[in-house]
Amino acid sequence: MIGRLSPNRVVRNDSICIHCNKCTKACPVNIDVAKATEVKTTECISCNECVNICPKKGALENKFSKKIISPLVILILVFTLFFGGIFVTQRLGWYSNVAAPLKEGETLTIEAIRGFMTLSDVATGLKMDIKDLYTKLEIPESVPPTTKFKELSTFVPGMTDEKAKEILTKDMENPISQETKTNMVVVTEPPKEPVVLKGYMPLSDIAKILNISIEELYQKLKIPFTVPPTTILKQVDTFVPGFDFEAEKTKLESNP
């Protein structure tokens, strides 16, 4: 409708036109410009390809009301209106190209988690300790809390943001109430939980989980101290050819 009502349109002068059909062939939306007196169709996007390719001066012209305007002026006007509109609305606070930060005390639902949010943002919005979030999603401690939610798969293979949401949803569906926690029997010496290691964990994190020094871990794995402690378990074989991380992981889990 705006295109139909616009005072700007392409006009063809039939007395000057040589009927070469170049304008029709150049039109990206397949308008038959060579047969039109005025291009009034709603499909016209005012790209001026037809005007620019016309070999006969004056055969095709861009007119604003009754004045002839060059394609360059039209281009400048379009850019001014587009970017000027964005600038004005941003200054007035009507438009923003980034999501608004969570307000203090605002709660975030799992469905509202977006990929551009950081792990810190997600934990804050869910009223959850950042360490609990890392534990639930099996995120290594070495991963920065500023990591975007959609980039989890970079550090945790196969962990897409959708899968992470599913894990958090299931966890929220079966929470342990505070009353249940209060009434739970306190065990003086709780049974030792089985050690679960992952191939993507750095050697430094594995040493912390096993509560041993990095040197003791290297001795257990029989690897040289030249291997960086930031190396993940499944990539130790790049420094120690023949290193079977699955077998070593099993040994560490069974005899921590």
Image (spheres, helix red, strand yellow):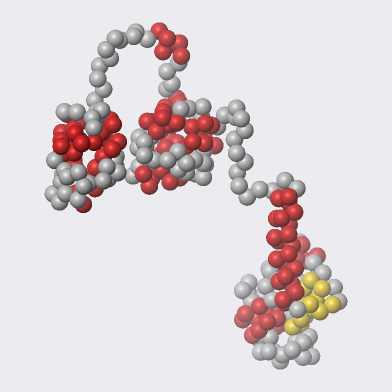
Residue 51 appears left or right of 231: right
Residue 248 position by quadrant: top left
Q: Nearer the viewer, residue 237 or 11?
A: 237
Residue at (86% x, 76% y) in the render: 66
Q: Is residue 133 above or below residue 7?
A: above
Res 32 seen here: no
Q: Quadrant of the N terminus?
A: bottom right
Q: Is residue 23 above or below residue 145?
A: below
- Whole-percent x, y for residue 45 in the image: 68, 69
Q: Is residue 118 above or below residue 47?
A: above
Mark count: 0
Residue at (23% x, 36% y) in the render: 214
Q: Nearer the viewer, residue 12 or 53?
A: 53
Q: Is residue 45 above or below residue 153?
A: below
Residue 190 position by quadrant: top left
- Whole-percent x, y for residue 57 in the image: 74, 89
Residue 132 appears left or right of 16: left
Q: Nearer the viewer, residue 185 or 160?
A: 185
Residue at (71% x, 55% y) in the render: 87
Res 157 seen here: yes
- Whole-percent x, y for residue 105 in the image: 60, 27
Q: Quadrant of the C terminus?
A: top left
Residue 250 appears left or right of 21: left
- Whole-percent x, y for residue 83 in the image: 70, 60
Residue at (68% x, 86% y) in the render: 54
